[in-house]
Image: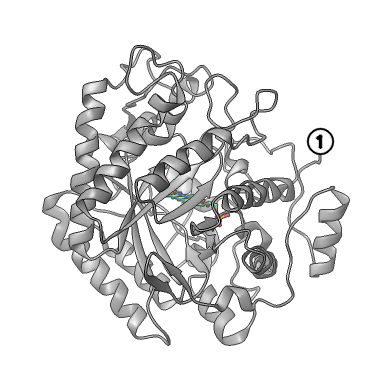
Amino acid sequence: MTGHERFRFGTAEALREKVRALGLELPFAEDIGPLLRPGAIAGRTVPNRLAVHPMEGADAGPDGAPGELTFRRYRRFAAGGAGLIWFEAAAVVETGRSNTHQLLVRPANLAAFKNLVAETREAAARTAGPGPVLVLQLTHAGRFAKRNGKPAPVAAQRNPHLDPLLKTDAEFPLISDSELDRLQAGFVEAAEIAVEAGFDGVDLKACHGYLVGELLAARARSESRYGGPLENRARFLLETAGRIKKRLPASLLAVRLGVCDGVPSPHGFGGSADDPERPDLAEAAFVVRGLRDRGLDLLNVTLGIPAYKPYLGRPFDRPAVGNPLPAEHPLASVARLIRAVSALQGQFPDLPVVGTGYSWLRRYFPNVAAGAVGTGRIFMAGLGRLAFAYPDFAADLRDKGALDSRKICLACSHCSELLRAGRPAGCVVRDSEAYRVS
Ligand SMILES: Cc1cc2nc3c(=O)[nH]c(=O)nc-3n(C[C@H](O)[C@H](O)[C@H](O)COP(=O)(O)O)c2cc1C
């Protein structure tokens, strides 16, 4: 085992030396030019190869309409110059919300979402260069759904590894096939609302253990059109994607896919039989092929389930309170993410793929991301926690050629703690005016 360590690299060479010492490989480029080149996603232009990842802010009103802090966050992201802003997980039905402050896409919130898109585009228009592409992530929180602060799981299967995390009655009911049929329609309706609000397209969230991601793992779901063999497990995602593309052919169809959830076989998705944390991309590739056939325009690749093994998807210095320190070095987690994303991009070279796993690299992330983009390992690099801390990272890279180390994310997990508590999530270190731990 490689051993967890905090980030402590004074130079890029020291970081690269550690990568070598750990027997890992990371792309690296001195020239960050590849990040600043425009690119095309299904006929739309992104002005650069830097994306803001979807990041739940838990700051919507109880009705699910964006709140003041939601507007502030997206104005700041837009002013920050990223080429793609991937708006956070927004529930498509009330029972699919992860907390009472999660965005909810429903007809009554259309005007509010329109305002959010308009303000975001206006903030971008005040800056240099063409504006970003805007995608909204649609979700159902599934087994992690909550009502009034209490777990209200809507799970696809029993799972001995994940059920204990719910701290609720183990006999919670499983979602039925007819409810899933109806939910497909809920996703389609939400997609229509999002496009009417002005988004360039929608993402079906199929990751992090939430319902659509969990269905991909639902081998233990018996006598169901949505469980057992892979064709059935992928059915919800593929059919819903196909229906959305048919209804909204001119809009971008995106998916955020968790290609390996880290849960041991047979209850997980995408892990190797002997090591659940080592991605085996055969099933993920089947899913992506099916999505491509149905008109997928854009893919964002991620790993893990934050409530289970958070280091797989968001390598950190300090774990969130109550979580153990992982046994592996954060660079091993970063390298796993980058390997998995590049392997999939390699199988689908014409599909724009957004990579994950860069915030922990701090001021050296642009070199690694430029190495990945420049060699075709990814189309764009996505930033999550770093965007909370430093929303104008892309503008600084464009205008100054480097990041300001006083603004970067410290991977301290406070934003994760805020979200877990259902409180407005943001950077308590770099944006303490708006966010506080206590
Ligand atoms: C507070 C918080 C909220 C998040 N919300 C979402 C979300 O809404 N949708 C999603 O797909 N991922 C979400 N993520 C995961 C991020 O998009 C991203 O994959 C992760 O933070 C790793 O990227 P990073 O290292 O750049 O932070 C969230 C992560 C955090 C810490």
| Residue 335 x %, y % | 70, 50
Judge whether 243 appears above or below 21 on screen: above
Going by the numbered disc 1, the residue's amino acid type is Met
The quarter of the rendered structure image containing the N terminus is: top right
Instruction: Confirm if mark 1 falls within 8 A of ligand 1.
Output: no
Q: Toward the viewer: 356 or 298?
A: 298
Q: How many marks?
A: 1
Q: Check disc 1 and report its element: helix, strand or loop.
A: loop
> In the figure, is residue 139 to the left or right of 77?
left
Query: Is residue 104 visible in this depiction of the protein?
Result: no
Image point (65%, 52%), residue name: 338
Q: Which residue is mark 1?
A: 1
Image point (22%, 45%), residue name: 188
The residue most toward the left is 108
Judge whether 320 appears above or below 382 on screen: above
| Residue 191 x %, y % | 24, 51
| Residue 407 x %, y % | 59, 72
> In terms of image quadrants, where is residue 313?
top right
> In the figure, is residue 98 to the left or right of 412?
left
